[in-house]
Image (cartoon, rainbow, N blue to C red):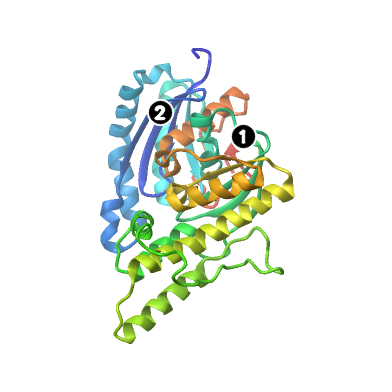
């Protein structure tokens, strides 16, 4: 274990300041400072507030991670940071901090891709990723199907959302129901008390002529809003638990159906699910059931590793070091639209 790379990872793509430390595939520290409560009154993440919160939390969170791991900064073999995609200002705080630490410590810097990191974090729980791995990533900003023959160098997008991401749809439906922000956890909780078959909400892009691996949840969100509006205009009570359960069922049905199809079409025997929505209990249960029926091995990290965190960045950084990938230049940019086909950025654009 002592020969494995010791890497610190910094994640600031949205509203969580995450700092993780890993040695090889072993998680040593996972420190997170979230500003989600600061955004709740606005019903969504405010980029300027997130950036300021990252700036204030960065050094204390790094110090907390080092203390938790029981290592000194000088012991590190490399610094990894999310270079994109994400909110530009938020990314810039993390990238600037990573550059400063890498320069001051004389350590190599690895700017890595946020989406590829969500895939790589599973190594911390279930060991090395099979090659290739099929990954379903679902979060507030992304709904993607990725084929990863090599998570450090070869990630191929098969499908993505064409409008609202799954997590975004959860937040918007929660707003319609008056449940606050973020919407995912509260809808998951309420759905357990409701009937998922109560309302037949639409399944977007599941027709025979539709793109087989792309996702669309905007129509579903609108259908829920109209259904609720109709009930309210008629003076009828809205069965919130049934709406939550039926909406959640529609989302998880589409996500798992397309993921299983992609595995079959590509001849891949492993499915990894990551991103914040992967913490949803119904998605995990449905994926487990459908993967078992299809003979596919399912890998899902524990919920704490599904949401944005520094551990996932450190995990991908450690894999970069282990495979002798070229480090990034100190001119590394923060790229809010970094494509998933670039798992890491060797130099400046």
**Residue at left offset 56%, top offset 68%:** 203
- For marks 2 and 1, the one nearer the N-term is 2
Which residue in the protein does label 2 denote? 101
Please indicate, yes or no, whether residue 340 appears anywhere in the rendered image.
no
Residue 55: percent from left, percent from top:
31, 42
Based on the displayed image, in which of its 4 quarters is residue 345 positioned?
top right
Residue situated furthest top in the rendering: 2
Disc 2, disc 1: CB below 8 Å?
no
How far separated are the C-alphas under marks 2 and 1? 23 Å
Residue 267: percent from left, percent from top:
73, 44
Residue 294 position (above or below residue 124): below
Q: Which mark is residue 259?
A: none
Nearest the eye: 13 or 263: 263
Please indicate, yes or no, whether residue 119 appears anywhere in the rendered image.
yes
Residue 224: percent from left, percent from top:
43, 73
Nearest the eye: 242 or 203: 242
User: Does residue 66 appear left or right of residue 123 in this picture?
Assistant: left
Q: Residues within 10 Å of mark 2 (few under 14, many from 20)?
A: some
Residue situated furthest bottom in the rendering: 234
Residue 52: percent from left, percent from top:
30, 48
**Residue at left offset 42%, top offset 78%:** 227
User: Does residue 270 appear left or right of residue 24 in this picture?
Assistant: right
| SS category of the residue bearing label 2 | helix
Nearest the eye: 4 or 76: 4
Which residue in the protein does label 1 denote? 152
**Residue at left offset 49%, top offset 30%:** 124
Residue 282 position (above or below residue 1): below
**Residue at left offset 49%, top offset 31%:** 125
């Amino acid at each position: 274990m002592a020969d494995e790379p010791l890497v610190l990872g910094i994640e600031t793509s949205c509203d969580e300041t995450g700092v993780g430390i890993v040695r090889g595939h072993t998680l040593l520290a996972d420190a997170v400072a979230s500003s989600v409560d600061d955004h709740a009154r606005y019903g969504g993440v405010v980029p300027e507030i997130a950036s300021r919160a990252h700036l204030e939390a960065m050094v204390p969170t790094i110090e907390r991670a080092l203390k938790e791991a029981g290592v000194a900064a000088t012991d590190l073999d490399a610094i990894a940071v999310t270079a994109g995609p994400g909110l530009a200002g938020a990314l810039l705080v993390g990238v600037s901090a990573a550059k400063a630490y890498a320069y001051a410590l004389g350590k190599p810097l690895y700017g890595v891709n946020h989406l590829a990191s969500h895939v790589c974090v599973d190594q911390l729980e279930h060991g090395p990723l099979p090659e290739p791995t099929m990954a379903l990533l679902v979060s507030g900003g992304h709904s993607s199907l990725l084929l990863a023959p090599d998570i450090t160098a070869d990630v191929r997008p098969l499908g993505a959302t064409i409008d609202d991401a799954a997590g975004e749809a959860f937040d918007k439906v929660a707003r319609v129901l008056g449940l606050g922000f973020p919407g995912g956890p509260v809808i998951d909780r309420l759905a357990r008390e409701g009937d998922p078959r109560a309302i037949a909400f639409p399944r977007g892009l599941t027709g025979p002529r539709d793109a087989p691996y792309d996702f669309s949840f905007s129509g579903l969100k609108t259908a829920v809003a109209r259904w609720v509006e109709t009930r309210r205009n008629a003076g009828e009570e809205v069965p919130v638990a049934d709406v939550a359960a039926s909406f959640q069922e529609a989302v998880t049905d589409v996500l798992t159906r397309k993921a299983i199809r992609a595995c079959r079409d590509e001849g891949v025997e492993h499915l990894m699910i990551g991103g914040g929505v992967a913490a949803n209990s119904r998605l995990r249960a449905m994926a487990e059931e459908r993967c078992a029926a299809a003979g596919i091995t399912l890998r899902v990290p524990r919920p704490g590793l599904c949401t944005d965190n520094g551990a996932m960045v450190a995990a991908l950084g450690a894999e970069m070091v282990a495979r002798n990938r070229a480090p990034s230049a100190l001119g590394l940019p923060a790229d809010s639209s970094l494509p998933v086909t670039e798992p890491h950025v060797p130099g400046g654009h």
